[in-house]
Amino acid sequence: MHILDTHALIWYLRDSKELPPSTKELISSEKDICVSVISLWEIAIKKSIGKLDFEYTPSDIERLCYEKDILILPILPKELDILGTLDDIHNDPFDRLLVCQAINNAAIIITKDEDVAKYPVRTYWK
């Protein structure tokens, strides 16, 4: 299973040059690509406070993910339990929750964020 970090999701949906071609290919071809509801929450918050100019609403993203066979992961209580065990490496609460989901699901996080890779998770960005 692979979980898209928020920036990877945005760049994938925008077909941005920021997303490396091999990462785009992985997202397009892999069967178990997921996005966390955390990322939709992050997008909604950042749009509402003017920190993100993004053309899609969370409902639009849900539809696009469905069309592209990307599963949306809910937040589970077990993942919130993991949150309390993490070292204080990353201050971003959204990324910390993605790490918890990756740990719980033995998933790889598709991210450019080098701080995420400091946690006991696998990451991908090529």
Image (cartoon, grey):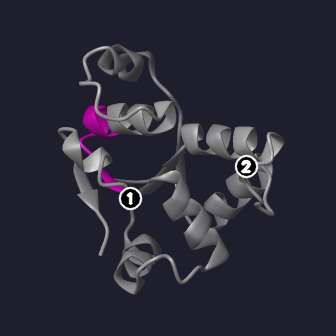
Q: Label 2 neighbourhood size at 10 Å, few (<14), some (14-19), many (20+)?
A: few
Residue sitting at 45 percent across and 23 percent down?
76
The three-letter amino acid code for the residue at tag 2 is: Lys
Screen quadrant of the C terminus: bottom left
Q: Would you say 26 lies left or right of 5 here?
A: left
Q: What residue sits 24% from the left and 49% below the top?
A: 117
Q: For residue 83, what is the image quadrant?
A: top left
Residue 71: % across, % down: 52, 51
User: Residue 91 appears at what percent x and percent y?
Assistant: 42, 32
- Which residue carries the number 1 mark? 111
**Residue type at mark 1?**
Thr
In terms of sequence position, does the residue under pointer 1 or pointer 2 come before the other?
A: 2
User: Picture coordinates of residue 96 (x, y %)?
Assistant: 40, 33
Residue pictured at 38% horizontal, 75% vertical:
23
Mark 2 highlights which residue? 51
Q: SS of the residue at dot 2?
A: loop
Q: Secondary structure at mark 1?
A: loop
Q: CA distance from mark 1 to mark 2?
A: 20 Å
Asked if 63 appears above or below 28 in the picture, the reply is above
Q: Is residue 1 visible?
A: no
Mark 1 surroundings within 10 Å by alpha-carbon count, few (fewer than 14), some (14 through 19), many (20 or more)? many
Q: Horizontally, is 104 left or right of 63 in the view?
A: left
Q: Which of the 4 image quarters holds residue 26?
A: bottom left
Circle number at residue 21: none
Is residue 20 depicted above or below 46 in this figure?
A: below
Q: Which residues are magenta?
A: 102-112
Say whether residue 78 is magenta: no
